[in-house]
Image (cartoon, rainbow, N blue to C red):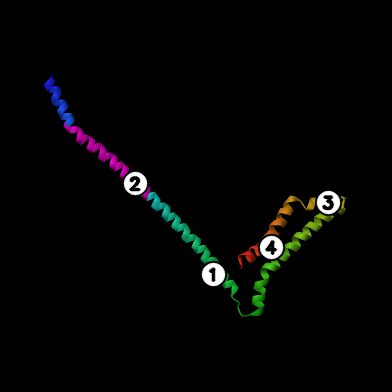
Amino acid sequence: MLTLLGSLLGFISSAFPDLLKIWQDKQDRKHELQILDRQMEQMRLGHNQRLEEIAVNADINESLALLKHDSQPSGIKWVDGLRSSVRPVITYAFFLLFTAIKICALYVLVFDQGLDFVIALPQIWDPETQALFAAVMSFWFGQRALAKARGQ
C-alpha cells in the first residue's frame, strides 16, 4: 500500500509542474486578452476623439468660409447696402413690435382695466421681460465689448 501511495504521490508530483504551467498559461492568455481589450478600447476612444476633432474642424472651416464670403463686397452698391442692412432692419422691426405690444398692454391695463399707471407699469415690466431685455442688451453690447477686448 505504501508503494502504491508513493507511486501515486510521485506521479502527481511529477505532473504538478506541468499542471502549474498549464494554469499559468491560462492566466497569461487571460491577461493578454484583457490587455488587448483595453488597447482596442483606447483605439476606439482615440478614433472617436479624432472623428469629433474632424467634425469640429469642419464646422470651423465652414464658419470661416461663410464669414469670408460675407465680408467680400459684390461691387454693386445697393446689393452691398441691402446685405449689410438685413440684421439691423430685422432688429429694429422686432424692437418696434415688442415696444408696440408692451405699449398696448399698458394701455389696456390703464384705460380698459382702470389701473393706476404706477401699478400697471410693473405688470408689463415683469421678470421675464427684464430677462429678455438683459439678454438682448448683453448680446448686442457685450459682444462688442468682448471683441474690443480681444482686439478684433
Q: Position of 104 compared to 134: left or right? A: right
Q: Secondary structure at mark 1?
A: helix
Mark 2 or mark 4, earlier in chain: 2
Q: Disc 2 to disc 1, how far (Cα)?
A: 44 Å
Magenta part, dominant SS: helix
Residue furthest to the left in view is 3
Q: Which residue is mark 2?
A: 35
Q: Report the residue at 67% width, 69% height from top.
A: 86
- Mark 2–mark 4 Cα distance, whole angstroms, equals 55 Å
> Residue at 64% across / 72% down in the picture?
83
At label 1, the amino acid type is Ala
Label 2 to label 3: alpha-carbon separation: 72 Å
Q: Which residue is mark 3?
A: 120
Q: Tell me where the magenta segment starts and ends, as one range.
A: 14-39
Circle 1 crowding by C-alpha within 10 Å: few under 14, some 14–19, many from 20: few
Name the image quarter holding the C terminus.
Answer: bottom right
Label 3: how many Cα within 10 Å (few below 14, some 14–19, many 20+): some
Q: CA distance from mark 1 to mark 3?
A: 50 Å
Q: Secondary structure at mark 2?
A: helix
Distance (Cα) linking label 1 and label 4:
25 Å
Disc 4 marks a residue whose amino acid type is Phe
Q: Judge from the rendering whether residue 144 lies leftward or rightward of residue 12; answer left or right.
A: right
Label 4 sits on residue: 141
